[in-house]
Image: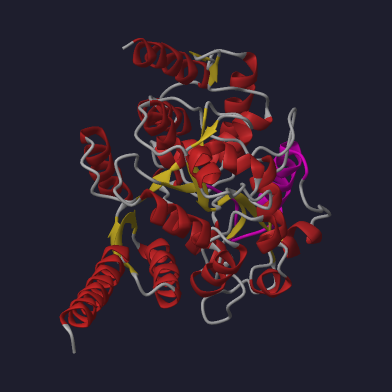
Amino acid sequence: MNKQVLFWAVAALLLSVAVIGAAGGQEEEAKVTLTVAGRDGAYGEAMQLAADEYSGRNPNVSFEILKLSGSSLLEKTVVDLSSGTGTYDLIMIDDPNAPRMTRAGWLADLDELYRKHGATLDKDLIANVVKLGRQPYSDSGTLYALPHVGNVELFAYRRDLLDKHGFGEPVKWDQVLSAAEKMSAAETGVAPILFRGAKGNPIVTGFLPIYWAFGAEILENDKPAFSSSQAQNALEFFLELAEYAPEGVSMYQSAQVRDALYSGTGAIAIEVWPGWIGDLDNPEKSQVVGKVNVTIHPGQAEPSSPLIGVWLLGIPKDSGHKDAAFEYLQFITSVEIQSLMARETGIPPTRESVHQNQELVQKYPWYPAQLKGLQGGVARPRTDFWSEIESNFGTNLQLALIGDVSARQALQATQQRVQEIIGQ
C-alpha cells in the first residue's frame, strides 16, 4: 500500500469515528428529563400515567414528577418562578392563581410555541376554560396555559324524593326552596339541604352559584360589588335555604356533605364536585344507588352559574426544555390521553369530545351536565387578591349563617374590607 492510499484510508477511518462520536453525542443531548410540579392524589396518579405512557413512546424523555398538596405546590412554584431559577418544565396551576403568574410574565407564551411548532390550538378544548389560561382574560388574550383538569361545581338531588313530592329537576332556586320546605314537613331523618358551611373557601364556594344566579357580582370594574341589591337578595335567600340544612352545618366540610348524600340522610346538595360523587351508584359504598341525579345548578335572574375550578398546565419561561415540554403538553391534553386519565383515575377532562365518549358517559353519568357546567360556568375574579377576598367574604358569610350578623351587615363588612384589600 503506497503512502497516498494509506493516508486516505486513515483519514476515512478517523472521519467515521468522528461521525459515530458525533451521532452518539447528539443522541445523548436528545435525552431530556422534564421536571413537573404537580398535585397529589388522583391528579398525581393521572400525571404519572400520562408521563409513563409518553416515556414508553419517547424513550429519550424521562420525568421527575413532584406530587404536592395545593398549598405546597403554590409556594414552591411562586418561589421558583419569581426567582427565574428554571427548576420546573411544567407546572400545574389552580386557575385563580393564573392571573398573578401571567401578569408577572413568569410563563412561556404558548401562542409563540404553537407557531414555532407549526401547530394550532385544538378547538375541541372547551373555549370557556381555555380563557382561564389567557392574559388578558378573554377569547383573544395571549395563551400561557392549557386546561388540564375540568373541575366544575355540580348540583345533586334525590330524584326519588323530589318526584314523591311533585317536583321535577329544579331549574330555579325558588323551586329548591319550595322542595326543601315540603320535604322538611313530610320527611323524617332527611335533611332537605346540604352544603359546606365552614368559613373561608368552603362556604364561599357553596354560595357562589346562588350569588351569581341572583345577578350579584364580586367585582365590577375592579371594585367590590357586595353592596348591591342583588347581593342582598342572594344572601337573604341563602340564609332562608340554610334553615333546612342539618344542625351544625356551619362546620360542614366536604366529608360531611358527601357522607350525608351517600347515606341518604340528605336530599339536595347545592355543591358537589366530580371527585366527591364517583361512588354514588356503588352499592358497597352508597345507600342511594340509582336515586341521585347530578346536574347543573338552577338559575334565577341569571342562567345556571356554577363555579369553575379548573387546573391548568403551563411552561415556566425559564425552563431549559420548553420545546420538549410543549410537545408533552400537547400529548397530555390530547383526546387519547384525556380519555385514558378519565377512565383510569376519574379526573374530569377539558375536551368536549371526551365528555361525549359513550364509554365514559356510562361510567360517569354526570358528564353531560359537567360539560354544560364547563361551557357556561363562571370563573372566580381574575385578580391577584382573590385569596384575601375569599377569606374575608367566607368569614362574614359564616357569621351571617350562625346569626351573629344580618345579611346586610355581612355584606357591608365584606365591602369595606375588600376595598381596603384592593387599595393596598
In the image, farthest residue toward the left:
3
Residue 282 painted magenta? no
Residue 399: x, y in percent? 41, 29
- Image quadrant of residue 350? bottom right
Which one is in front, 333 or 318?
Answer: 318
Which one is in front, 340 or 161?
Answer: 340
* Residue 420 to residue 103: above or below: above
Left or right position of 419 against 119: left
Which one is in front, 270 or 330?
Answer: 330
Which one is in front, 141 or 252?
Answer: 141
Left or right position of 109 against 391: right
Residue 191: x, y in percent? 58, 54
Tell me the quadrant of the picture where the C terminus can be found: top left
Residue 187 painted magenta? yes
Would residue 297 be visible to someone looking at this image?
Answer: no
Q: What is the magenta range?
A: 171-195
Left or right position of 249 against 229: left
In the image, farthest residue toward the bottom:
1
Left or right position of 67 against 247: left
**Which residue is at 45% across, 59% downward?**
328
Residue 264: x, y in percent? 59, 66
**Which residue is at 35% across, 11% downward?**
420
Q: How many marks?
A: 0
- Image quadrant of residue 279? bottom right
- Image quadrant of residue 67? bottom left
Tell me the quadrant of the picture where the N terminus can be found: bottom left
